[in-house]
Every structure is written in structure tokens, then in C-alpha cells.
């Protein structure tokens, strides 16, 4: 018979600690845990992103339903890019959510307080909350003096649109780092003009909340004119987000009161099948923003020319 004293020291340790793990077993467990983390973390991140996309879409729908109800009450008329001293869509939404103050300028509204203005995805990259959506103010003026140009549609009539369920009213604004200024201020400038109070000195020179709109063709996320623009994810003058959520879509609310995610178009070639020389992707976005079929070919090459002598 063997006694503990006659065993090798390492053998005695194993007998005294029968449940102890070997180094190899510990390493196997660590590797398995690392693999589980590598698998689960991206899935959790995607789940959170998906939840933010769903929340955003729900908020966009609240806005367009409210605007649709307003339209029914006010003889088919709804606000688009109204000036800051007129009935602005943000004022309309704030009142629905309990704001009772009567402002002389929409920039007096504390937009940081109202969740329907905040896209949970876009807000993550901002130093403070602001308006995270842009309203459709695109108005084609093909017969403008001096050549085709974009006008500013301050108000619209639902009856002007043959298929309101296909026309965007509100959509995710692009991340500030991907937007640059053109004849209009950048999205970052709009936010800082509001936060700093610069608009108080001259609201026409320093637009803020009222600058969150789509005024010209180059504000769309995909385009093609005399030269290519907004054809990649590189910074550009687009105000509409190319793919705010899940790297594949942006949330939009439509004139009939529904909301949906809009992906980027993938139509190759310079012809959309209806208009010679018009990029198919750009033509789709022009239609989505209410440009009539007979106007698309004329307006396709108009990037930023407006009917205003001094655009804001």
C-alpha cells in the first residue's frame, strides 16, 4: 500500500485538491469566453442600433400624422419651409406636445426639450440636442427668369400631389461631419446659430431651426448634374442622410401620414429609363421630394441655383 508520503509532491497536490483546474483548462475557458464576447457584442450593438432606428421611425410618424391632421383642419394647407416668424412645422409639433408659449420667432422654441425632434442615432454625435430632421421645401421652377431654379416652398397643398404617399415630408438629416456649406449654411452652423443665440442679432443672416430643410437639388443624398455630387459617403452639401440607420437606410415621413425607411438607390448608368442623361438614382430622389415627372429632365442639372436673390 502506498501512503501520501510515498507519492510525488505533485501527485499529493492533485489528491488534496481534486477540483483544481489545470492551466490548459483555464486557457480553454478563457478562449471560449473571448469567442462568446466576440460573437455577442456585435449582435448587441446591432440590436441597439435597430432599436434606435425603430424609435426614430416612430417619432417621424408622430410628426407626419400631426401634420396630416393639421392639413385636414386648414383646408389642405401644411407648413413646409415657413420662415421663423411664420407657422413653422416645429412650432406645430411643439404645441401638440404641450408647448403653450406664443413665439414671435421659432428659434425661441427650446428644441432640446422635445423628443420628437431628436433622432436617437444622430443625437449620439452631437454636443447637445437639436432638430435632427429636415423638411421637404423643394420646389422646382423650370421657367424661372434666367433659367431653371429652385424656389422655396413655404407652404404646400396636399391636393397638389397626385400620390402623397410617395412624397417625403420629413427625413433624417445627415450627420454634421458629412455636411458642408454651399449657398446655404451647413447643418452644424444652423445648430450653433441656435445654441449661441446668433439668430437674435439677425435671423436672416444666421438661420437656425428654420435652416433644417431641403431647398435645392444638392441637398439630396444622391445626385448628378453638370458634375457628379453626393455620389459617395464623402462629405458633401447633402442635408438628407444617406444611411442614418444600420448603415443602409434613413427614416422618412410621407405626406399621407406613414413613415418608412428609405435605402440608397442602386441604379447604374446615366439614364433612369424615363429621361435621357438623368442619373437614375437622382431621378428617384427628385420624385420622392415631389418633383413632377415632366420637370425632372429640366431640373436634373440644377444644383443650387435659386429664385432668391439672397438665399438664406
Image (cartoon, rainbow, N blue to C red):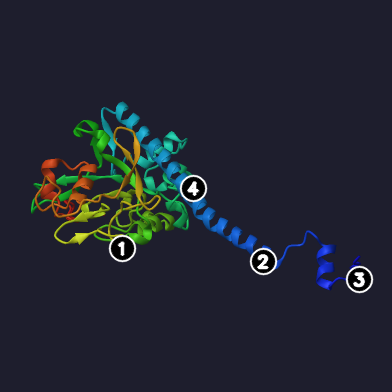
> Is 304 displayed left or right of 134 in the figure?
left
The residue at which mark 4 appears reads as 47
Label 3 with label 4: CB-CB less than 8 Å: no
* CA separation in Å, label 4 and label 2: 35 Å
- Residue 72 location, x and y as percent? 30, 27
Residue 3 location, quadrant? bottom right
Residue 80 location, quadrant? top left
Q: Which mark is residue 5?
A: 3
- Residue 181 location, x and y as percent? 29, 61
- Residue 215 location, x and y as percent? 24, 50
- Residue 247 location, x and y as percent? 38, 53
The residue at which mark 2 appears reads as 24
Q: Secondary structure at mark 3?
A: helix
For marks 1 and 2, the one nearer the N-term is 2
Q: Within 10 angstroms of label 1, few (less than 14), some, or many (20 or more) residues?
A: few
For marks 1 and 4, the one nearer the N-term is 4
* CA separation in Å, label 3 and label 2: 28 Å
In the image as oriented, which residue stretches furthest toward the front?
1
Q: Secondary structure at mark 1?
A: loop
Q: Nearer the viewer, mark 1 or mark 4?
A: 4
Residue located at (25% from left, 42% from top): 154
Q: Which mark is residue 234?
A: 1
Label 3 with label 2: CB-CB less than 8 Å: no
Q: Within 10 angstroms of label 3, few (less than 14), some, or many (20 or more) residues?
A: few
Amino acid at each position: 500500500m502506498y501512503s501520501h508520503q510515498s507519492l510525488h509532491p505533485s501527485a499529493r497536490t492533485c489528491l488534496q485538491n481534486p477540483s483544481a483546474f489545470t492551466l490548459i483548462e483555464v486557457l480553454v475557458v478563457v478562449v471560449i469566453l473571448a469567442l462568446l464576447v466576440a460573437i455577442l457584442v456585435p449582435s448587441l450593438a446591432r440590436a441597439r442600433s435597430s432599436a434606435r432606428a425603430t424609435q426614430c421611425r416612430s417619432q417621424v410618424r408622430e410628426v407626419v400624422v400631426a401634420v396630416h391632421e393639421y392639413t385636414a383642419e386648414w383646408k389642405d394647407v401644411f407648413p413646409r419651409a415657413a420662415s421663423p416668424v411664420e407657422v413653422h412645422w416645429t412650432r406645430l409639433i411643439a404645441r401638440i406636445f404641450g408647448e403653450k408659449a406664443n413665439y414671435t420667432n421659432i428659434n425661441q422654441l427650446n428644441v432640446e426639450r422635445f423628443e420628437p425632434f431628436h433622432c436617437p442615432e444622430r443625437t449620439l454625435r452631437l454636443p447637445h440636442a437639436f432638430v435632427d430632421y429636415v423638411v421637404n421645401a423643394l420646389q422646382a421652377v423650370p421657367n424661372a427668369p434666367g433659367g431653371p431654379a429652385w424656389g422655396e416652398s413655404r407652404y404646400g397643398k396636399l391636393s397638389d400631389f397626385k400620390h402623397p404617399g410617395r412624397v417625403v415630408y420629413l427625413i433624417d438629416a445627415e450627420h454634421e461631419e458629412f455636411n458642408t456649406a454651399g449657398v446655404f449654411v451647413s447643418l452644424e452652423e444652423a445648430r450653433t446659430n441656435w445654441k449661441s443665440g446668433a439668430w437674435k442679432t439677425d435671423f436672416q443672416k444666421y438661420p437656425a431651426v428654420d435652416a433644417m430643410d431641403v431647398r435645392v437639388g444638392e441637398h439630396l443624398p444622391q445626385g448628378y448634374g453638370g458634375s457628379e455630387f453626393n455620389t459617395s459617403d464623402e462629405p458633401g452639401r447633402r442635408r438628407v442622410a444617406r444611411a442614418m440607420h444600420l448603415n443602409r437606410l434613413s427614416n422618412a415621413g410621407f405626406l399621407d401620414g406613414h413613415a418608412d425607411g428609405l435605402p440608397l438607390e442602386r441604379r447604374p448608368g446615366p439614364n433612369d429609363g424615363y429621361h435621357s442623361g438623368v442619373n437614375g438614382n437622382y431621378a428617384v430622389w427628385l420624385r420622392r421630394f415631389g418633383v413632377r415627372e415632366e420637370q425632372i429632365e429640366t431640373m436634373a442639372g440644377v444644383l443650387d441655383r435659386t429664385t432668391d436673390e439672397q438665399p438664406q
